[in-house]
Image (cartoon, helix red, strand yellow):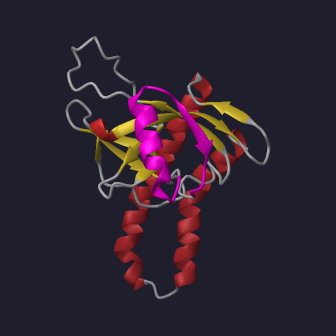
Amino acid sequence: MTPSPASHLDPVLDDILIGRRSVSFRNEGFSMHPFIKKNDAITISPVIYRPDPEDEEIPRAVLRIGDVVLYKNASDRWLLHRIIKKRGGSEDEIVTKGDSLLISDPPVARSRIRGKLIFLARAETNREYRLEKAFQRIICSLIALFSRMEASVFSIFLDIEPRFSDREYMLMVRKGIKFPKWLLIRIVFP
């Protein structure tokens, strides 16, 4: 999910997040659907990277499995995707995935993470969700677990897909893989 398909948000996001201020805007992408829908209002809190864990001058941001984070990918494009895995001895690499996607993103260095989703307001229902509350964090962790399983199962089907000539069958498999996560999101975040 990109906050904006246009690059006009780039300097604004950089300035605000580097300046340690939260930013709110309306979603325009689809990669986090159904968790974040088009025109939902979202608030991103800055994440400050502290390369030295002993440096107490800079507060170290806590990033958890299930958090939805904002970063620039290798193509210099803003992405807002969910953390599904941490890698490295000190968890310096993070693997993310859009909720509506079946394949995870390439690992990203923790230092590239600029913000974390903390608030979501549904455009169509006017419901609001504060994502730092314990219940929401637990549900987001479960969503991340389902996302990680989706990516694993789908990679197996990618290996065997050429054996199937029926594309409708593969479409049905894709929908079946995504159903548990979709149902959880629809129940908890309607």
Q: Front-most of 93 and 126? A: 126
| Displayed quadrant of residue 132 | top right
Residue lying furthest right:
125
Picture coordinates of residue 127 (x, y %)?
Answer: 76, 37
Residue lying furthest bottom:
165
Left-right relation of 157 to 23: left
Left-right relation of 6 to 190: left
Left-right relation of 95 to 25: left
- Relative to 82, say whether 182 is above or below: below
| Displayed quadrant of residue 113 | top left
Q: Front-most of 3 and 178? A: 3
Q: Front-most of 159 and 73? A: 73
Picture coordinates of residue 37 (x, y %)?
Answer: 65, 52
Q: Is residue 10 magenta?
A: yes
Give the residue displayed 38% in from the left and 83% down from the top.
162
- The quarter of the rendered structure image containing the C terminus is top right
| Displayed quadrant of residue 94 | top left
Give the residue displayed 31% in from the left and 17% down from the top.
58
Give the residue displayed 64% in from the left and 45% down from the top.
185
Picture coordinates of residue 44 (x, y %)?
Answer: 52, 35
Q: Is residue 38 magenta?
A: no
Give, as a single range, the part of the protein colored magenta. Answer: 4-29
